[in-house]
Image (cartoon, rainbow, N blue to C red):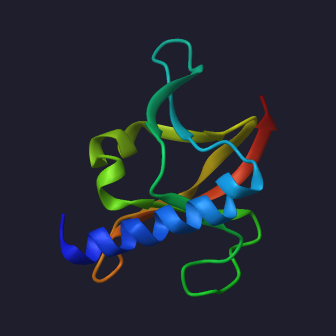
Amino acid sequence: MSLLADVQAANLRWSHRLNHVDQGETEKIVFLKRAPGTNALAALVTVDENWSYSSVDRNGNRLPPDVLFELRVAEDSISSSDLKQAAAIQHGSQLFQIVRPSPFEPTGFERFWRFWLAPAEDV
């Protein structure tokens, strides 16, 4: 991982602690995939830290009307092959649908994945 990716991962870790863990929220997020045949959601990858989400995009702009949060995950926390299978994200008791066209790949100086999330249900 590059120095820039390391710095941005540390920033996401700090934001994660400040905005989620210190507020009493569950530390982990779980990426979910659709199980073949049943189409039921099943765990794919768990990310313990190096993530955070916000109600504005990375530039501080409003998100599209059907999007509640933008999730940012450090570049090395999830593989591109796992991303192809990801259908939803669970954070504690909240289930979020991944809104297309996200996920957005790390590009240029932004070394994190970005996901647009819409609430799906409480589990």
Q: Tell me which residue sits at (56%, 87%) in the image.
A: 59
Residue 16, picture quadrant: bottom right
Task: Pick whichever, 17 or 37, lies toward us.
Answer: 17
In the picture, measured across the screen, residue 12 lies left or right of residue 26, that is: left
Task: Pick whichever, 112 or 1, lies toward us.
Answer: 1
Residue 17 visible to an observer of this rendering: yes
What is the x, y in percent for residue 109? Answer: 30, 83
Residue 100, picture quadrant: bottom right
Task: Pick whichever, 57 or 17, lies toward us.
Answer: 17
Instruction: Give the residue at the far front of this rendering.
Output: 22
In the image, residue 110 above or below residue 101: below
What is the x, y in percent for residue 79? Answer: 29, 46
Please count the marks in the image.
Answer: 0
In the image, residue 4 above or below residue 102: below
Residue 113, picture quadrant: bottom left
Q: Tell me which residue sits at (75%, 48%) in the image.
A: 24
What is the x, y in percent for residue 17? Answer: 59, 59
Instruction: Give the residue at the far top of this rendering.
Output: 37
In the picture, measured across the screen, residue 54 lies left or right of residue 42, that is: right
What is the x, y in percent for residue 107? Answer: 30, 76
Q: Tell me which residue sits at (40%, 67%) in the image.
A: 10
